[in-house]
Amino acid sequence: MTQNELAQARQQIDALDEQIQSLISQRARIAQAIAHIKQRMGDTGDHYRPAREAEVLRAVIARNQANGGPLTDEAIARLMREIMSACLSLESPLTVAYLGPEGTYTQAAVLKHFGDSVRARPMHAIDEIFRDVESGAADYGVVPVENSTGGVVSHTLDELVFTKLRICGEVMLPVHHHLLSAGTDLDKVTKVYSHPQSFAQCRKWLDAKLPKAIRETVSSNGQAAAQARAEGVGVAAIASLQAGRINALNILASNIEDDPNNTTRFLVLGKQDPAPTGQDITSIVLSGHRNQPGSLLKLLQPLANAGLDMTRIESRPVRGSAVQDYYFFIDFVGHAATPAVRKALDEVSAAAGFFKILGSYPRAVV
């Protein structure tokens, strides 16, 4: 490429940048106009609509695939998410509670789903996230519910049984763990801090590389990074790169998870019921009647009869029960507002000792 060709290419980029900026500004002005229209209609709540945003992102990805990229679907969706986040903040800024401190994977899930323009509010424990949203201090909450390696997050399941909140969405976050420390020498690490699930996800690597190091569990990987910073050389944390940057830690090793496909699923909690999108998940929790053989089969039969694809089932003991009573948490493809699903759920409810719809919400886009 000659210098003249390079100059022409740069001029084209400058012209496109000007067009892009102008179009983004137009979109932002329309977002402000929509906010005024909704206010005149009496809609004074937040203007985040999970179904609408999922549809926009799916359309963005479809266009990207039709045009052949060259950006990945994840990259183009992330760019659009930030534009949507910035425009939504002009309508009604959102406060989202998450499991803190700063630098946790839950915070990363918040930013992936809502974009950087939200007010991310760190909480000390999962039950505090539920209370924060229930009280109205936060508009939404994001909680971890399961990991592809470590399994379910029992605290989240227990809270879902009794909360009045609804599941409004889900976030699938690829999780890459890093060993971080104030020091620079892996051989000098004698203690490692981490969340219990992260230890489970990195067990083989730790056994091979740091078999003699003491493993101390903490409530979050963000806290682990802060602890490593406070204790200095010889102490490390398993945490995210963001936690390392926040705490000015060095990277001793990257991507130390045993499973390269390690993924955590998060739930978005709020007070609204998203409209059907055609690509939805419904989550329910139920229990059978005590001492009835085959009760679980009877509860699941209406879902099978309706041809509903069940994607997850987990059990948790009923707290305070003197016998082995269990709640069953079930996810399946479909939306509770559609007639076929509604009919099946009515049948399940009639046969259950306890039944609750936790939410119908759009499947994670990327």
Image: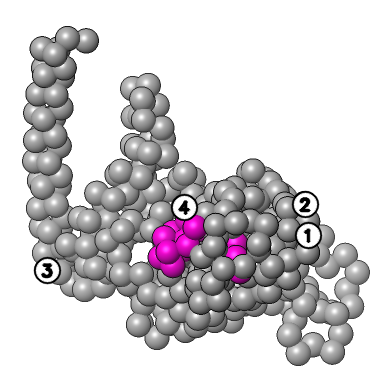
Task: Provide the residue designation for mark 2.
Answer: 208
Question: Looking at the picture, which amino acid does disc 4 mark?
Answer: Pro
* Disc 1 + disc 2, Cβ < 8 Å: yes
Question: Looking at the picture, which amino acid does disc 1 mark?
Answer: Pro
Query: Image quadrant of residue 234?
Result: bottom right
**Part of the protein shown in magenta:** 235-250
N-terminal of the pair, mark 4 or mark 3, is 3
N-terminal of the pair, mark 1 or mark 4, is 1
Across and down, in percent, residue 172 comes to 53, 52
Residue at (50, 81) in percent of width and height: 124
Q: Residues within 10 Å of mark 1 (few under 14, many from 20)?
A: few
Whole-number angstrom distance, CA of label 1 to CA of label 4: 43 Å
Asked whether the viewer can see residue 339, the reply is: no
- In the shown orientation, is residue 74 left or right of residue 237? left
**Which element type, helix, strand or loop, lies under badge 1?**
loop
| Up/down of 345 relative to 123, above or below | above
Which of labels 1 and 4 is toward the front? 1
